[in-house]
Every structure is written in structure tokens, then in C-alpha cells.
Image (spheres, rainbow, N blue to C red):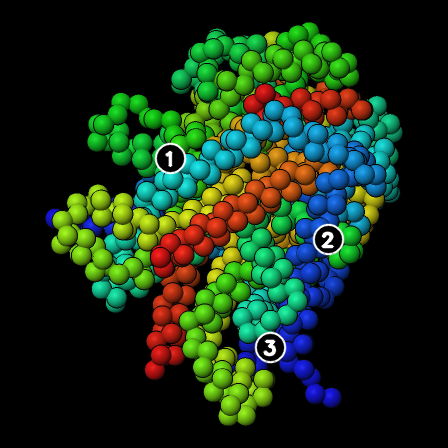
């Protein structure tokens, strides 16, 4: 009996050791669900010997809250959208990037740099950009029926829509229908949008921003919002799922690499960013995720089919018709208040 | 007539309980990635699961937490139950009330309360915070399990021990502990299960450096197509069946 | 020095409970009376803002919705679990253990994985729809995912053992000769149930209901996975208050209200048990 106890204790200690021990070469990456292909992470570890501890979130808000809560003990790399880059930067949650460690950053698309949310890109480097539009399963619903955001309000779609579980993207629809900017800070305009969204709620079947393509692929949903990349991935399984840029303009966004102020493995984080900006790696990401990359040198490497795809790379007119998400400052609280009301069924 | 109805009823309930599990196990060996139709037998999802380093590490972490917390909580819970049952002291009522509340409290509240405590105490979120939280939320269940056994004991046994000149610690070691062994074993199993299964508390009190299985599963289940989840479920189910057989075997042994 | 066994153990237990259960709950209570602040979670000013905000009809709706899910789940578990426990208490001892172990095996599988399994069944292209279609019972798939039905089914699936076990524990002690005696005295099945079986199994019923109702109030991830995250439940609302909108006092106030409700339920349970035991003696 004694021996058994000793054996048990010993095994326990052996298990415990790695917990207490410090192992050096790691990088803690906190990213959107399904945003970096597994193979890319493996390749990074193989090439550099740096182990990637990878965890995921499903909204900017969740990521922000978690980072704020565990200040000091955290992640080395996160991927906020533009308006959260601005917010986190203003709250001192980010550290400046060291461009000496990021030689691959020279190939970035100038159109996506030096924006208001982070002038001179001191704190952030764009990872991917894409849009939020409409997905339709043409097997069930004729694509002529859905050409604009407004069409989602059609009473025919009662209890059928999928919406992104993302406050800004949902408000984008209503603000654009009303003819306002989707980055509006005007409380009146936001309220109008809320009133319009209230009328949309009976049509909603579910909210999902982890992998919105799945309900479409499983046949649960035939019309609703989707990210272009998710639509792209869904098309690989089912050609009938088409991606539509709505008439009022799609919602465009950029997600960036940022390093939190208290990150411990700063060099490894830089190495990871630099690796991700390599043309061959960026190519894999585009082809797997279906979002556009700011790495210009990757574009010639892409498959014809991908490069020509309007879903992945919209033309200039489509981009001009849409609107890029930017920081809304204090107005974010107003959005939050209405968002919660919508979700409470009010 | 009644017999037949009874049999049907059992069949119905077990069908309800086992159907989803059977579907999972079947899909774990189904080549079709989405499990929508049968494409032939395969074990590739099991090897995919084993090669998923993150998953394996989380599984290891979960086992470590579950074994540690189940062991510690059973010790603490056993002592608490004995103390509450045998001794009359000030605060006893409060402690038992608190235990009841802790058992009844929704996980989310407990999780937040613990988080606030850890942040204020400066405990870094990771292994230790997780261990403390798991011990805390398992404790009432352990106490209740042991207590129910104590209430079934014959109090004269303790009197007899005392009359024969046994010291307090001798009574505990020689009389109470052996009698409680089945209850302690039950408590250990229960706490192990609770710990391995907990999502809500863990998601609040652990940090990025210490990922545990339920959280990993949660992020996988949300995405939902990875057949590794099915493989993992199949392993879980086989594991629990083995555990059940083992526990039957052990209790049998003890009765002899 | 001789260690005093008694005092050591008492202080260990009291100390642990105070630090890890007492203090967190008191902290929560304390925070609920502070002033909300976006940046720093709360300010150290006494304030009833959180409780005033709680009067918002929206929160009442959320609360009612959570109660509705939990209550429906409890009722279904009771209806399904009661006969199960009753039959089990009447079969031969050696079979009982088999019946209960079979009940527990699914319970030992991770609850998330089981929720996920329910999803595989209920989908538009899931097993249930496919079977019904193949049998020709329906022409088009029925929508089951992302409905209240899916949420309640998932909850019942997860919680059923929690209902059956307390019921069984109570019924195991039931003296079945009472039923025979009643029958011999000419009582009908229904009267026997109403006058004898039901009152004697009431403690088990209540214990089971509490064991199911309370966790069902908090299990918001089931509603999230099976119900499509459309409408907030009390659990994720509390989570949002703490994490997303950084309003700790309001989140704490909601928690306090919920805890008070649980304590009241426990109190009622205690009272009924007491009355029951005195009535039983008299």
C-alpha cells in the first residue's frame, strides 16, 4: 500500500514539473477562431524551434476584456480589428513594434498603411483584410431576391437568418440602409439604426462568429451575413453558397498584428509576425482562409482561381461602395448599450 | 403488462441517453469528415487527435488538475465532514450553510467571485489559481458524499473506541477512516468528474499558459467539424466505461 | 509539542471556507454596492446604481427567460425521471446497480461533447431528420436546431441523472408494503399515488428539482450551442457585465439577486422537509 502511494506521488510530481519549470522558446498567440492554418503554425515551429501556444476568441470585445483583465500575465500576439487597435493603443495596452525585426514588412500594400487608427503603423501591422457581406444558398433561395442589406428584412425570411455575433458589423447594415456612415458617432443615428435592427430580430435564427460557414454548409441557414473568407471556404464544399456584396456597401475591415504592452516573448512575437508576412506563407493563408493579404509579393504566387475571385479580392468599385471600419471613440458605449438591448429581446 | 411497460420505459430512457453517444463513437471511425454519411471505417481521426499537440497538452493539464484537485479536495472534504459531524464549535452552522450555498450557486457566479479574489490577491492565473478554484467548487460535493456515509455510521463505534482508550487521532486512523473509505473513493470519483467537466469556472480562472481540456473542447465544438472531437469523445467514453469497471472491481475487493 | 487534532482540523476547515468561499461572496456583495466605471471596473463610492439599473424591464425579461428554460427542463426531467427511479427502486437489488451504472456512464463523458452530440442528431441533415425522411414520415426536414426545443432537449439530456439519483435515494427507503396495504383496503391506483406514494417521495422530488433547476439556470453554453445565442440568458448576461461592458457592480448585483433566490429556495425546501417530518411522525 505504501509503495502504491509513493508511486502515485511520484507520478504526480513528474506531471507537475513542466508546470513549474520555465521553458524559454514559446510565443502565446491569441487569435480569431480559424484564422491561421494549422500547417502554417507547424511550419513556424519547425523552422524556428519556437513553440506556439495558440488560443482563440470570437469577437474583439472578448479579446479586449481578457487582455485587460489579466494584465501582465498574458499573450504575446493578438489580432484586433482597426477600431480596437486604436482603443488599445490609447489605453496603453500595446507596445511599439521594432521594424528592424520585421524585414518582410517592406512588401506591405501602401493602401493599407498609415491610417488614422495607427499613424505610421507604430503599433500594428495588417495581417489580413476582408469584408462582411451576404451569403445565399442558391439551391434554396434565388440570388436575385437578395442584393442589398435591406432584403434581409424581407418578412419571408422569418426565423431564417444568420447574423455575425459582432456589434459593429450588425450595426453597419442598418446604418448603411439609413444612408449614414457605418462609423457614425451620432447618438441619434445610432438610435435609428437600433430601431431598424429591432425589426430585423424576428428574422434572426442565430448569431455566430466562430465559423459562420458551418450553419450554411449543414443546411441550417440559407441566407444571412458572412465574412468573405468564410464564404470562400464554404464554396469549396458547396458551390451553391454564393457571396454577395450588398448594394448599400459591404463592411470592410482590417485585422492587424499587435503586441500587448506586457508581452514576455517580444522577440518571438516579432519572429512570428515576420514569418507570417513572408510571401509563401501569406499565400497559404489567403488560399486557406479566403481573405485578402496586404503582402504584395504574395499576390503573383497565388492560384489564378484565387486571384481572380471577386469573393477574395473585390474590385475597386466594390471597395469604394463599401466602408472601412474605423474607431468610433466614446460612441462605442452607445453601440454597446443598444446591442445589449437587442440581445435581451427589447 | 406492467413488466413489459417497465422494460419499454428503460429502453426508451437508455435509448435517449445513449443515442448521441453512439453517434459520436460511430463518427469517430467514419471516414466522412462531416459525419453526414458513412464512408467506411478509419482510425485516422485518432492519429490526428494524437498529433494535435495543443489538445494533448490540454488533456495532460486537465488530468493533472483533476487528479490533484480530486485528491486534495477529498482529503479536505473528508476532514471537513468529520469535523462538522463530530464536533460542536462556533461557526459550525455558518460553515454548513456556506457549503450549501456554494453547492447551489451557479458556476458563473462562483467563477467571477474567484476571479475577483485572485486578482485582488495577486495570484497569477494558471495552474495554482485553477487548482484552488477547482478544490473550492468541488468541496461541498465531497463533504456531502462523506457526510451521508457518516450519518449511516453507528455512533457507538466511536464511543467504544474512546472507552478502550484510543486517542482522537487513533480513533480517526483506526476507526473512522477505514469506515469512510468507500465514501472517500466515491468523493474522489465525483470530484474528478466535476473537475474534468468544468468549463465555466476554468474559463475564468486560468490564463493562456495553462490551457485545459474543456476549454479546448469548447473552442473545437464551436467550430464543430473537426472529427478529432469525435475521436476524443470516443476515448472519453471508453475511459469512463473502464473507470466504472475498475471502480466496481475495487469496491468488490473492499467488501471481501 | 502535541498537535491538538480537534483544533487543527477545525481551523483548517474554517480557514479554507472563509478564504475561498466567504471572502469571494462578500467581495461580490461589496462590489454590487459600488459605482460602475468603464475604465477601472468600479469606483470606491457607495452607490445603489447597480440595483436601480437592475429594475430595467429588459433584465426582468432575461431573468424570466432563464427561469422558463430551467423550469421546463425540471418538469420534463421529473416526468421522465420519476417512473425511472420508481421502477429501479422495485427491481431486485443486484440489477439496481447495473441500472444506475448504465445511467452514470454517459454522465462521465464531457458535457460539452454530449451537447455537441445532440447537435449532430438534431441538424437539418442530422440523424433524426434523415430517419424520419427515410421512413416517409415527413416530406421536408423539420427545423430543430436553434429552437427552444433543442435547448430544452439538451438541458434534459445533461440533467436527467441529477433528477433520478435523489429520487432513487429517497424511493430506495420506500416501504412497498404500504402500497399493497392500500390496495388491499380498496384504494384505486390514483388515490394510492396521491395519498401515499407522492407525499412520501416528496423530499426526493424537491431535492431532484433543486439539483436540476439550479444548474439549468446557469448552463448558458447549452443555449449558446443549441439555441443559436439569439437571446441573452442570466448566465451570459452576468458574464457580459463583467467582461464586455465592464460594469462589475451591475454584474455583481445580478449575482447577488440570484444567490438570494437560491437561498430562498433552499429555505423553502428546508421548511417543507421539517413540516413533512413532523407530519410523518404525527
Q: Quick check: do tags 3 and 2 share a chain?
A: no
Could you confirm whether marks 1 and 2 are on the same chain? no
Q: Residue at x 32, y 53 (%)?
A: C200
Of the two numbered discs 1 and 2 in the rendering, the one whose residue sits closer to the viewer: 2
Position in image of residue A21 (x %, y %): 72, 66
Q: Secondary structure at mark 1?
A: helix
What residue sits 37% from the left and 35% below the top? C122
Tag 2 secondary structure: helix
Q: Chain of mark 3?
A: A
Q: Quadrant of the C terminus of chain A?
A: top right
Say which element carries label 3.
helix
For marks 3 and 2, give the CA distance.
31 Å
Residues at marks 1 and 3, common chain?
A: no
Q: Quadrant of residue B95?
A: bottom right
Residue A296, position in %: x, y? 73, 29
How far apart in space, not on screen, are marks 1 and 2 (Cα)?
41 Å
Using the image, name the chain to which the residue with label 1 belongs.
C
- Report which quarter residue A178 is drawn in: top right
x 65%, y 19%: residue: A171
Q: In front: A66, or B93?
A: B93
Q: Which mark is residue A250?
A: none
Question: Does the residue at mark 1 contact the one at mark 2 (Cβ under 8 Å)?
Answer: no
Q: Residues within 10 Å of mark 1 (few under 14, many from 20)?
A: many
Residue C182, can we see it? yes
Q: Which residue is mark 2?
A: B117
The residue that disc 1 covers is: C122
Q: Nearer the viewer, residue A251 or C156?
A: C156
Residue at the disc numbered 3: A10
Amino acid at each position: 500500500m505504501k509503495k502504491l502511494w509513493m508511486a502515485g506521488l511520484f507520478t504526480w510530481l513528474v506531471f507537475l514539473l513542466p508546470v513549474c519549470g520555465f521553458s524559454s522558446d514559446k510565443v502565446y498567440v491569441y487569435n480569431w477562431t480559424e484564422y491561421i492554418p494549422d500547417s502554417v503554425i507547424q511550419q513556424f515551429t519547425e523552422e524556428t524551434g519556437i513553440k506556439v501556444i495558440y488560443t482563440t476568441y470570437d469577437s474583439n470585445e472578448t479579446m479586449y476584456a481578457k487582455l485587460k483583465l489579466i494584465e501582465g500575465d498574458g499573450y504575446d500576439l493578438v489580432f484586433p480589428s482597426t477600431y480596437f487597435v486604436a482603443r488599445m493603443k490609447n489605453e496603453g495596452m500595446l507596445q511599439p513594434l521594432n521594424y528592424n525585426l520585421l524585414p518582410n514588412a517592406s512588401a506591405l500594400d501602401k493602401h493599407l498603411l498609415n491610417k488614422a487608427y495607427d499613424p505610421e503603423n507604430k503599433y500594428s501591422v495588417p495581417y489580413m483584410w476582408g469584408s462582411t457581406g451576404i451569403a445565399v444558398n442558391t439551391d434554396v433561395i434565388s440570388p436575385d431576391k437578395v442584393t442589398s442589406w435591406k432584403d434581409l428584412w424581407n418578412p419571408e425570411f422569418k426565423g431564417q437568418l444568420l447574423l455575425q455575433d459582432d456589434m459593429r458589423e450588425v450595426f453597419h447594415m442598418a446604418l448603411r440602409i439609413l444612408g449614414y456612415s457605418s462609423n457614425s458617432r451620432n447618438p441619434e443615428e445610432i438610435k435609428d439604426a437600433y430601431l431598424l435592427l429591432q425589426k430585423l430580430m424576428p428574422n434572426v435564427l442565430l448569431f455566430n462568429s466562430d465559423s459562420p460557414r458551418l450553419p450554411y454548409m449543414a443546411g441550417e441557414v440559407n441566407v444571412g451575413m458572412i465574412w468573405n473568407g468564410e464564404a470562400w471556404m464554404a464554396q469549396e464544399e458547396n458551390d451553391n453558397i454564393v457571396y454577395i456584396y450588398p448594394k448599400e456597401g459591404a463592411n470592410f475591415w482590417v485585422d492587424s498584428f499587435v503586441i500587448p504592452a506586457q508581452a514576455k516573448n517580444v522577440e518571438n512575437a516579432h519572429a512570428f509576425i515576420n514569418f507570417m508576412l513572408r510571401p509563401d506563407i501569406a499565400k497559404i493563408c489567403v488560399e486557406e482562409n479566403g481573405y485578402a493579404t496586404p503582402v504584395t509579393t504574395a499576390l503573383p504566387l497565388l492560384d489564378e482561381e484565387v486571384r481572380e475571385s471577386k469573393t477574395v479580392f473585390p474590385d475597386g468599385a466594390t471597395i469604394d461602395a463599401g466602408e472601412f471600419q474605423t474607431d468610433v471613440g466614446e460612441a462605442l458605449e452607445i453601440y454597446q448599450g443598444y446591442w445589449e438591448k437587442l440581445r435581451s429581446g427589447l | 403488462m406492467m413488466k413489459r411497460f417497465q422494460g419499454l420505459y428503460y429502453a426508451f430512457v437508455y435509448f435517449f441517453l445513449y443515442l448521441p453517444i453512439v453517434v459520436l463513437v460511430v463518427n469517430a471511425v467514419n471516414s466522412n469528415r462531416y459525419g453526414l454519411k458513412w464512408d467506411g471505417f478509419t482510425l485516422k481521426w485518432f492519429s490526428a487527435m494524437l498529433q494535435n499537440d495543443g489538445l494533448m497538452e490540454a488533456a495532460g493539464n486537465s488530468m493533472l488538475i483533476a487528479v490533484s484537485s480530486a485528491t486534495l479536495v477529498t482529503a479536505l472534504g473528508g476532514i471537513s465532514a468529520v469535523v462538522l459531524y463530530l464536533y460542536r464549535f462556533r461557526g459550525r452552522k455558518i460553515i454548513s450553510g456556506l457549503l450549501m450555498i456554494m453547492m447551489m450557486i451557479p458556476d458563473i457566479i462562483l467563477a467571477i467571485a474567484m476571479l475577483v479574489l485572485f486578482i485582488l490577491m495577486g495570484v497569477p492565473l494558471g495552474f495554482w489559481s485553477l487548482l484552488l478554484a477547482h478544490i473550492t467548487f468541488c468541496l461541498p460535493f465531497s463533504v456531502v458524499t462523506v457526510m451521508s456515509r457518516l450519518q449511516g455510521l453507528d455512533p457507538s463505534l466511536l464511543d467504544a473506541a474512546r472507552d478502550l482508550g484510543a486517542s482522537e487521532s487513533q480513533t480517526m486512523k483506526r476507526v473512522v477512516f477505514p469506515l469512510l473509505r468507500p465514501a472517500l473513493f466515491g468523493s474522489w470519483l465525483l470530484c474528478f468528474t466535476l473537475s474534468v467537466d468544468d468549463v465555466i469556472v476554468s474559463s475564468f480562472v486560468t490564463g493562456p499558459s495553462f490551457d485545459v481540456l474543456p476549454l479546448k473542447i469548447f473552442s473545437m465544438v464551436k467550430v464543430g467539424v473537426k472529427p478529432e472531437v469525435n475521436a476524443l469523445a470516443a476515448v472519453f467514453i471508453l475511459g469512463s466505461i473502464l473507470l466504472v469497471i475498475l471502480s466496481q472491481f475495487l469496491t468488490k475487493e473492499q467488501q471481501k | 509539542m502535541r498537535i491538538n487534532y480537534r483544533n487543527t482540523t477545525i481551523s483548517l476547515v474554517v480557514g479554507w471556507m472563509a478564504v475561498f468561499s466567504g471572502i469571494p461572496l462578500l467581495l461580490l456583495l461589496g462590489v454590487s454596492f459600488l459605482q460602475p466605471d468603464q475604465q477601472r471596473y468600479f469606483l470606491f463610492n457607495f452607490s445603489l446604481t447597480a440595483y436601480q439599473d437592475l429594475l430595467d424591464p429588459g433584465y426582468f425579461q432575461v431573468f424570466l427567460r432563464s427561469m422558463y428554460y430551467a423550469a421546463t427542463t425540471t418538469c420534463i426531467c421529473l416526468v421522465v425521471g420519476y417512473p425511472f427511479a420508481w421502477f429501479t427502486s422495485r427491481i431486485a437489488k443486484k440489477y439496481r446497480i447495473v441500472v444506475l451504472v448504465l445511467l452514470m456512464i454517459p454522465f462521465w463523458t464531457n458535457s460539452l461533447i454530449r451537447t455537441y452530440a445532440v447537435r449532430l442528431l438534431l441538424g437539418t441533415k442530422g440523424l433524426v431528420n434523415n430517419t424520419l425522411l427515410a421512413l416517409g414520415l415527413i416530406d421536408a426536414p423539420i427545423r430543430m436546431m436553434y429552437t427552444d426545443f433543442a435547448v430544452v432537449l439538451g438541458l434534459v439530456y445533461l440533467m436527467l441523472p441529477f433528477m433520478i439519483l435523489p429520487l432513487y435515494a429517497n424511493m430506495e427507503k420506500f416501504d412497498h408494503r404500504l402500497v399493497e396495504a392500500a390496495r388491499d383496503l380498496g384504494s384505486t391506483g390514483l388515490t394510492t399515488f396521491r395519498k401515499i406514494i407522492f407525499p412520501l417521495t416528496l423530499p426526493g422530488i424537491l431535492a431532484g428539482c433543486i439539483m436540476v433547476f439550479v444548474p439549468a439556470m446557469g448552463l448558458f453554453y447549452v443555449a449558446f450551442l443549441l439555441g443559436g445565442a439569439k437571446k441573452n440568458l442570466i448566465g451570459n448576461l452576468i458574464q457580459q457585465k463583467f467582461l464586455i461592458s465592464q460594469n462589475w457592480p451591475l454584474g455583481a448585483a445580478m449575482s447577488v439577486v440570484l444567490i438570494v433566490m437560491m437561498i430562498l429556495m433552499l429555505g423553502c425546501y428546508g421548511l417543507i422537509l421539517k413540516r413533512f417530518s413532523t407530519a410523518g411522525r404525527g
